Amino acid sequence: MDPKKIQEWERARLDDPEYYSHHILGQWSDIGEGQVYKDWNFDWQPDPEAELLYGLDFGFASDPCAVIEVRKRGKRLWLRELTYSSGLTNDDLADVLEDNGVNKMATIYADSAEPKSIEELKRRGFRNIKPATKGPDSIRAGISKIKGFEVHVHPDSKNLIEEYQFYSYKQGTDKPIDDHNHLLDALRYAMSKHRSGPIVALPTLTR
């Protein structure tokens, strides 16, 4: 078992024992009252006319780099985990994006705390990468925004499903524990500035 996962679970056990105890309920089960997101669907039949964008949470050593594909149509979202990996340089990350068929003109919202990384990806050709909007209440606002959608998750997105299971509020508060949230942060970034607009079909790249 991944030692980093064990460390995350141990932190969860100390921060919120009740939340931790629900992990044994099994895959894809809603955890309980403390779970941030509930009632997601685990299927993959996106609307062919859905808008396509991506969210990116940078990481390197202790935290993974997380990239999520988001397809949006009306009040429905289809989510797919693209990468969840530690030790990636920005050049490695650019290769990962290309290998996953991310068009270089696709809209990518990334963690605004890393402007240098954003610029390096732009220089690798991803010209439409943008810093996500962050602020004092951006986490709560972003969560609230996502809760307004019917969400579908690709069943092969195992790390995203695990984060969905574990991401919970601190007991007695409306603030989530800062753990099990790398792909979910990437999702918030993807939705941080996005507004509905003309749908542009981008071809899938292959290598």
Image (tube, rainbow, N blue to C red):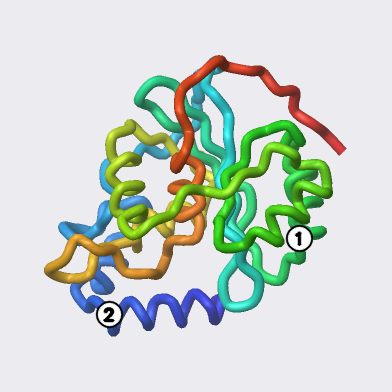
Q: Residues within 10 Å of mark 1 (few under 14, many from 20)?
A: many
Disc 1 marks a residue whose amino acid type is Asn
Report the residue marked by disc 2.
15
Residue found 54% across the figure and 41% down from its top:
80
Quarter of the image for the N terminus: give it.
Answer: bottom right
Q: Nearer the viewer, residue 25 or 11?
A: 11
Q: Nearer the viewer, residue 171 or 109?
A: 109
**Residue 136 rendering spot, x and y as whole percentages:** 34, 59
Question: Residue 111: which quarter of the image?
Answer: bottom right
**Residue 157 rendering spot, x and y as whole percentages:** 53, 48
Which of pointers 2 and 1 indicates the residue nearer the eye? Answer: 1
Q: Secondary structure at mark 2?
A: helix
Residue found 29% across the figure and 53% down from its top:
140
Q: Residue furthest right?
A: 207
Disc 2 marks a residue whose amino acid type is Asp
**Residue 96 rendering spot, x and y as whole percentages:** 75, 51
Q: Is residue 106 left or right of residue 38?
A: right
Q: Residue furthest left?
A: 172
Q: Earlier in the sequence, mark 2 or mark 1?
A: 2
Question: Residue 75: which quarter of the image?
Answer: top left
Q: Residues within 10 Å of mark 2 (few under 14, many from 20)?
A: some
Report the residue marked by disc 1.
90
Q: Secondary structure at mark 1?
A: helix
Residue found 43% across the figure and 61% down from its top:
181
